[in-house]
Image (cartoon, helix red, strand yellow):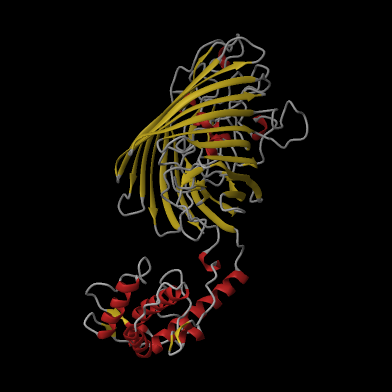
Amino acid sequence: MSDISLLMLGVLTAGQTSPPSNLPEQPVIQSDNGVQQLTEENLSPISPPAEITPPEFMQHESTSAAITPDVNHKYQNLLNKSHKNNSWQNSANQELPAETTPQLSPSVQLQISPESPAIPEFSDTSDSDEQMSQVTSVSQLDDVQPTDWAFSALQSLVERYGCIAGKNENYLGNSAVNRYEFAYSLNVCLNHIQELINKNQANSVSQAELDQIQRLQTEFQTELQEVIQRIDVLENKNVELKSHQFSTTTRLFGQAIFSIQGTNTTNVDLFPRDGVPERQGKTSLTFTNSVQLTLATSFTGKDLLITGLSAGNLGSNASLVSHNMGRLSFESNTDNQVVINDLSYRFLLADNLGVVVGSAGVNAATTFRGINPLEGSGDGAISQFGQRNPILNIGNGTGGIGFDWEISDRISLQGVYSAEIPSFPGNSNAAGFFGGRYSAGAQLTLAPTDNLDIGIDYIYSHSPNDLLGTGIGDAQLISPFAPSTAFNTHAVGATVAWRVNDNLQLGGWGGFSTSKPVNLSGSVETTNWMVFAALPNLGRAGNLGGILVGQPPKISSSNLPDGFNFPNFSNGGTPGGRSDTSLHVELFYRAQLNDRLSLTPGLLVVFNPDHNAANDTLIVGALRAAFRF
C-alpha cells in the first residue's frame, strides 16, 4: 500500500470557506423600540474577530516540489494516497554526486561526468548566464543517425551491459538523436560500465570493446565535456537557490480577491403579522478586496503546519436588507487589519489515519471531505449558501481537533471537535475549549462508484444563547422579545455529487436540525435543501459554470412555550413554523483567464427572503476577480 501523505494547503479558496462568525444571523428586534435595524450589537456578545476563509487542504503531488496547488482537486481532505518517494525538499535542493574520473584500464581513461538523476533539459539559456552561454547550442550539432557507426557501437554496449535501462531509452529504435543527447547516453553507459568493473562484474571487457569505447570518447570528446560543464552550472545554480530560497521546509501561497457587488432596493416586512412592509432596505455598489497568505511547513515530510493570515474589507449586507440570505462566499471584513485565520498542525497517526489540531482553522467545514464541486470562495459559487450544507457551519467552530480515517479506497470517516473561541481566558461558561459555543460531528464519506460521491453528516452543538451558528436563513431560535437561553442541537444531513461526464456534474444536499433549550420545554426544528449543476470546462478548458436552486434553513416547527417561538414572535410568540418559504436561485460563470487569474460574474436571486412573502425579491450581483500566487 502506498504511503498516505497529508493533503497540502493549496489555493486558499479553491474549496472550503469558513463557517460564519460575527455576521448577523437573523434580524433581531428588541421590544423597547418596535422596529430595530439589524446591527452588529444584535449579535451574540462573544464572537470570533472576523469571518475569514481558511486555507483548505490539497493533495501532496508526487513531485520533488513538495507543496503544489491543485486547482481541480476532488476532495479537501486530511489524507490522500501518494507515491512512496514523496520528498519535502525542492528538486533544487538535491545535491549531485561529486565528479569522478574512474579508470577502465591503464590504457583507457573514461571521461565520465557526474551522473544526473534525470535527463537535463538541453535548451538554450539566457545570454545573461555567462557559464551557460559558453556551451555550444544543440542546434549547431549534427544528428546521430541509426546508420552511423557510433549509434551501432553504443547500442551494442547497451545490449551487452544494460547500461541505459530505466534512464534514457529514447535513442533506441530508428529515430535520429542530436549529438548532445547521444553524448549524455554515452556518459551514462560509461558510468554503468565503470560501476560494474568496480564491483568485479565486468572483467570480461574485451580489447575490441575497449577500443570501441576509446573511439567513442574521442569522437564525442567535445560533447562529453559540455555535459560536465552543464552539470557544473546546475550545481552552481543549486547552491545559489539553496542560499536564497525562502525556506527549505516552508512554502508560501496566497490569494487576492477584488470584487464589485450590489443589491436592489427592497421593501422589508420586519413584523410579519399584517403583511405590510415597515422599512426599506437600501444598499450601494461597493468595490472591496480580500487577501490571504498561507505558510505551509513540514518537518518530517508527513506533517504540515499551516499558518494563515488574512485581511479584507467586505462585510455582510445583512444589516442593510434585514436578513442574511444575500451573503457572499468571499466576505471577509477585518477593516483591512491582518488577522490569523488558521494556525493548525496536521500529521499522520497511522498510514491511513491523519490528525489535525489547532487553535484556528479547525472545524467541520475544513476537516470533512468536500463533496460539492461548486465549493470555493475564490473559484466556486458566489453565495455563502452555495458552499456546502449549512448544518456543517453549526457551532461556528474555529479551533479544536479532528481526524480523517481512510477505511478503504471507497469509504472514509472524518470527525471533529471544535470550539467557537477556544482561547478565551475569561468566563468558562461563555468561551473556552469546553465552554461557550462548541460542536462535535462526524462524516461518513462514500464513493460507491467511480463517478458518485456521498457524504453523510451528523453534528452535535451546544450554544450558550439562541443562535444556531449557520449564518444563513433561520439561525435565531427564539423570539427577540424572550430572554435568551442555551440550546443543544442535533443535526443530520447528506450531500451527493454525480459526475455524469467530464462536462456535467449534478447533485444536491439536504439538512435537518432539532434544537432543545436547556431550561425550557419543547424544541425547534429547521430544514434546508439545495440542488445544483456544475458545468466544468464550459466554453474552454478550466472554466466553470454553476446553477444552484435551494431553500435556506427554515424553522419548520417550533413548540416552545408561548412567547418564545420565533416564527410568530410578532404575534405573541405562539408555537408554529414558518408559513412562507424562501427560494434561492444562483447563476455564475468562472472564466479562467490563466493559471493564476480568474474572473467570475454571478447573480443571486432570493424569492420571499427571510421566509416572508411580504418581502420584496432580493437580487444580488457580483463580479469577482481572484488572483493566486
| Residue 334 picture location, percent across and down | 64, 46
Please indicate whether residue 286 sits to the left or right of residue 531 in the image: right
Residue 531 visible within the image = no
Between 70 and 304, the one lying in front of the other is: 304
Q: Quadrant of the N terminus?
A: top left
Residue 225's place in the image compared with 236, above or below, is: below
| Residue 173 picture location, percent across and down | 24, 72
Between 617 and 585, the one lying in front of the other is: 585
Please indicate whether residue 260 sits to the left or right of residue 148 in the image: right
> How many numbered marks, from 0 up?
0
Q: Looking at the rendering, which quadrant does residue 23 occupy?
A: top right
| Residue 255 picture location, percent across and down | 53, 54
| Residue 328 picture location, percent across and down | 50, 41
Between 549 and 309, the one lying in front of the other is: 309
Q: Residue at x 59, y 28 (%)?
A: 440
Report the residue that reaches farthest toward the right: 426
Q: Residue at x 60, y 62 (%)?
A: 248
Residue 309's place in the image compared with 612, above or below, is: below
Between 535 and 330, the one lying in front of the other is: 535
Q: Looking at the rendering, which quadrant does residue 452 occupy?
A: top left
Residue 47 visible within the image = yes
Q: Residue at x 36, y 85 (%)?
A: 210
Please indicate whether residue 47 sits to the left or right of residue 538 in the image: right
